[in-house]
């Protein structure tokens, strides 16, 4: 047993590891600045339920006998607990290194890719669980099936040999892992340029010890593929989806003459499902049993999550935060309604500057004449980041390029801006990442729009 202190314990990646360590016999405690704003935040209560002692960031005292202080990339050296750890000579370990240590104790399936990691991890976890594998899991989003019991839902400790993890490339930590099974879902421009991304994913693929599974439908992941009968995504593979039908209830398709139904929206989830199907079949589960399990999938938090449907108006919450994901989310929403009101909150000044041109190009191509795009102020998580770009500037540039874009500042104005415009068969889509208050914001906007 070890003693761990997490700085930023409420973060989705950090909280997953904290819960896993706590539920495998370790003593875990930590702090977060989120608790200063909301001392009784739901995540804090959920962590406490998992025997994780929590503190407001800046007011915690790290015990001298703590074995490791765990941080994420977002934690800067001026954070008080960080300074305490240095003064006490306590080893400071990055979240990804901690995850690497965990994977050494289990046979690991690492789900990598720019988009779809959380959904694929959740789908695979559902299939393996339903087929009595009793898997463990560390994910970037909470599973609805686990949240029903009051959990955050992004971590699970099973009795089986397999651990499923979401492996992140944004900070380069993807290359830390040597999983038995590795998956590359796609490679799109997000936090890094393509040349650097391809190096990272190629290194990851070379470190997979047993079976690398690749999406051949994505141009850049295709380049990294090795010959395998478990690759998926095109008619060059065994795992190719046919007869695809998308409805508001979910997705139906067939693989090798076996019919599948996934209770989730978004055509991108067909590829996510194919990845999970290929892995499960590699592990010896029949396609028929996989299909039965797939129907039990209940979705994950903020991934094309339908908050409600009132008077023919569908309200969706999604984690989309880069151009490819925003494009996919809007395209899915367009299938569900004849007009989309799309709201996006950028998750940082640097990401907005990085994605601006590509986002504008995507919106020019996918927005229909009647669709409307709303951009909020940038989410600022603190620290010393440069604020050399603003949402006002981006909206002005969008308008100059004939994109129907509007600034929502403050973001709470959004519901009021569209309340008198929305009609039956319209879709309201809220997108954004990183900000832990987005879920609460989205529910408030839904309430404002449909309270009367």
Image (cartoon, rainbow, N blue to C red):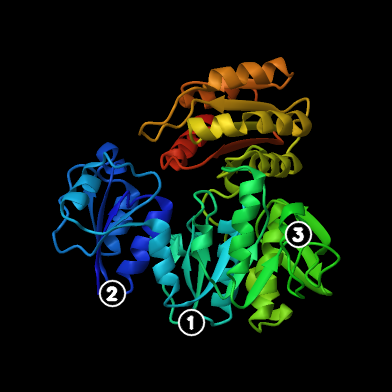
Q: Are marks 2 and 3 in contact (CB under 8 Å)?
A: no
Q: Residue at x 35, y 64 (%)?
A: 19
Give coordinates of residue 116: x percent, y percent.
62, 55
Q: Which mark is residue 222?
A: 3
- Gap between marks 1 and 3 measured at Cα: 30 Å
The answer to whether 168 is drawn above or below residue 146 in the figure is above
Give coordinates of residue 38: x percent, y percent.
28, 40
Q: Residue 25 carries which label?
A: 2
Crowd class of label 2 (few under 14; some 14 to 19; many from 20; radius 10 Å): few
Q: Give the mark nearer the N terminus: 1 vs 2.
A: 2
- Gap between marks 1 and 2 measured at Cα: 17 Å
Q: Quadrant of residue 321?
A: top right
Q: Residue at x 68, y 55 (%)?
A: 186
Q: Give the mark nearer the N terminus: 1 vs 3.
A: 1
| Res 358 seen here | yes
Give coordinates of residue 267: x percent, y percent.
73, 53
Give coordinates of residue 96: x percent, y percent.
43, 59
The answer to whether 395 is drawn above or below residue 310 in the figure is above
Q: Residue at x 78, y 25 (%)?
A: 369
- Gap between marks 2 and 3 measured at Cα: 41 Å
Residue receiving disc 1 = 161
> Left or right: 103 with respect to 181?
left
Question: Is label 1 in a helix, a strand or a loop?
Answer: loop
């Amino acid at each position: 047993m070890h003693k761990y202190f997490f700085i930023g314990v409420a973060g989705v990646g950090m909280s997953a590891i904290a819960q896993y360590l706590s539920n495998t016999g370790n003593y875990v405690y930590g702090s977060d600045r989120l608790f200063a704003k909301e001392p009784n935040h739901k995540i804090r209560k959920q962590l406490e339920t998992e025997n994780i002692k929590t503190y407001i960031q800046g007011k915690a005292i790290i015990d001298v006998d703590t074995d490791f202080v765990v941080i994420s990339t977002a934690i800067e050296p001026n954070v008080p607990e960080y300074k305490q750890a240095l003064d006490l000579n306590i080893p400071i370990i990055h979240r990804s290194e901690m995850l690497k240590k965990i994977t050494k104790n289990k046979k690991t399936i690492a789900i990598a890719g720019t988009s779809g990691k959380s959904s694929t991890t959740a789908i695979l976890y559902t299939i393996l669980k339903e087929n009595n594998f009793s898997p463990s899991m560390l994910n970037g989003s909470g599973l609805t099936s686990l949240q029903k019991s009051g959990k955050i839902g992004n971590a699970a400790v099973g009795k089986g040999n397999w651990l499923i993890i979401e492996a992140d490339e944004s900070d380069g930590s993807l290359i830390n892992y040597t999983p038995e099974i590795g998956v590359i879902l796609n490679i799109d421009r997000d936090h890094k340029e393509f040349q650097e991304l391809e190096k990272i994913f190629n290194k990851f693929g070379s470190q997979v010890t047993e079976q690398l599974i690749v999406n051949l439908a994505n141009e850049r992941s295709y380049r990294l593929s090795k010959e395998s009968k478990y690759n998926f995504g095109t008619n060059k593979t065994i795992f190719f989806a046919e007869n695809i039908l998308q409805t508001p209830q979910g997705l139906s398709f067939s693989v090798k003459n076996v019919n599948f139904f996934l209770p989730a929206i978004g055509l991108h989830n067909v590829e996510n499902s194919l990845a999970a199907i290929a892995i499960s079949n590699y592990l010896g589960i029949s396609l028929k049993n996989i299909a039965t399990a797939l129907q039990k999938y209940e979705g994950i938090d903020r991934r094309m999550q339908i908050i409600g449907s009132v008077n023919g108006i569908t309200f969706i919450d999604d984690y989309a935060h880069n151009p490819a994901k925003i494009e996919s989310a809007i395209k899915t929403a367009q299938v569900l309604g004849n007009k989309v009101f799309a709201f996006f909150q950028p998750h940082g000044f640097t990401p907005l500057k990085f994605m601006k041109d590509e986002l504008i190009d995507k919106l020019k191509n996918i927005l229909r004449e009647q669709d409307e795009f709303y951009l909020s102020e940038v989410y600022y998580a603190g620290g010393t980041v440069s604020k050399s770009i603003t949402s006002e500037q981006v909206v002005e540039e969008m308008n100059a390029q004939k994109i129907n874009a509007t600034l929502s500042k403050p973001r709470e104005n959004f519901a009021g801006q569209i309340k008198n415009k929305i009609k039956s068969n319209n879709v309201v889509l809220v997108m954004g990442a990183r900000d832990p208050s987005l879920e609460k914001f989205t529910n408030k906007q839904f309430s404002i729009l449909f309270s009367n």
